[in-house]
Amino acid sequence: RNPVVAVCGATGAVGQEMLKILEQRDFPHSEIIPMASARSVGKKVAFKGRELKVVELTEDAFAGVDLALFSAGGSTSEKFSPLAAKAGCVVVDNSSAWRMDDNCPLVVPEVNPHDLDWHKGIIANPNCSTIQLMLALKPIHDEARIRRVVVSTYQAVSGTGHKAVEELENQVRRLMSGQPVVADVYPHQIAFNCLPQIDVFMDNGYTKEEMKMVNETIKIMGDPSIRVTATCVRVPVFYGHSESVNIETEEKLTADDVRALLAKAPGVTVVDFPEKKAYPMPIHAAGEDDTYVGRIREDETIPNGINMWVVSDNVRKGAALNTIQIAETLIERDLLRVPA
Ligand code: A2P
């Protein structure tokens, strides 16, 4: 029998994309159950030309559910994921709640599918910025061992959710008609601006988003020797995160070596034709599944250095698609059950 699948947070930016991708990929299911907060009960969501009624996410909602795809925020996931797992339902969670938990694998299917083998009921989907970085780094690490990564991000507002997309739209509209802007979701105006703060500040002066990239990279690559330092910036783009990535490797790789390695990497498309002004951009990556890499060149200030530019749809590969690919890999490996 095909699994009964719950989409928790089905009314949100990522939840909506999950429903779209489940449909597009013809994900095996016997039933899809959209769940959200009490506020959304009675709302309907579209799936395969039908309308599905949203039900409330409650403690008892998981009886008879085989797989729950969560994207309903950290605190919701903290509360309900263990209850779901207890009811025998495997959880793939898109929030940051379980990512660094030693009992939960943190998985990018093209990079560390083997970590699914030890799941105990809850599997974490990495941060959007980390996922696309992993796709670009893994083939390079396997070939030449990465020592250090310096990454700066240019992150779209959709990563913050529905309300942030509306906030950017409204601010642009107001500014173009000479009205004062209202900043609600972000601490400052995001329209025509860049905010060097994503998530809250930590004691070490970094933001939580920056430290997520550091810690998650080590967990996914399974190599604590890789040093990562990050600066995360929110930019007025609706869909698609971009990253400027500087890498230092143990073995020498030329720019051509890196292009060849990434050209055959799963989930990666190289777009690198400077003479034609062709490089990855968020307007092209939006709506696509792959992570795009371009501007590949040697860092001339160190012996073994590479610079590159990495772009991906943050709502798809950065969230909904990767979550669903994890679920597909669980099915492929016959792991869609909570171990006793
Ligand atoms: P709701 O629409 O009922 O508030 P986004 O990231 O786009 O803001 O979406 C967040 C998603 O998480 C929405 O589907 C939202 O449902 C859901 N959600 C937020 N808080 C809860 C909660 N306490 N219980 C269940 N679902 C929640």
Image (tube, rainbow, N blue to C red):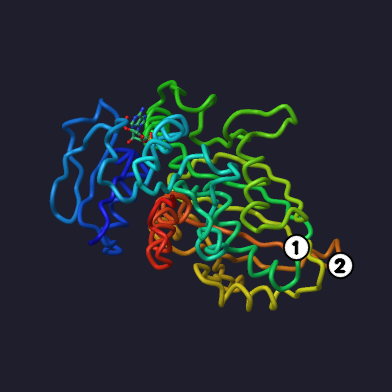
Which residue in the protein does label 2 denote? 303
Residue 297 lies, in percent from the top left, at 71, 68
- 227 over 79 or under it: above or below: below
Mark 1: which amino acid? Ile
Badge 1: residue crowd in 10 Å (few <14, some 14–19, many ≥20) = many
Image quadrant where one finds the N terminus: bottom left
Asked where in the image residue 202 lies, by quadrant, the reply is top right
Whether the residue carrying mark 2 lies under 8 Å from ligand 1 is answered with: no
Total residue callouts: 2
- C-alpha span from label 2 to label 1: 13 Å
Which residue is at 35% across, 46% downward?
Answer: 88
Which of discs 2 and 1 lies nearer the camera? The answer is: 1
Which residue is at 33% across, 44% downward?
Answer: 15
- 33 over 169 or under it: above or below: below
Residue 301 lies, in percent from the top left, at 85, 61
Q: Earlier in the sequence, mark 2 or mark 1?
A: 1
Indicate left or right for 245 with 167 as reference: right
- Quadrant of ligand 1: it is top left
Which residue in the protein does label 1 denote? 146
Residue at the left extreme of this rendering? 50
Which residue is at 16% across, 39% downward?
Answer: 53
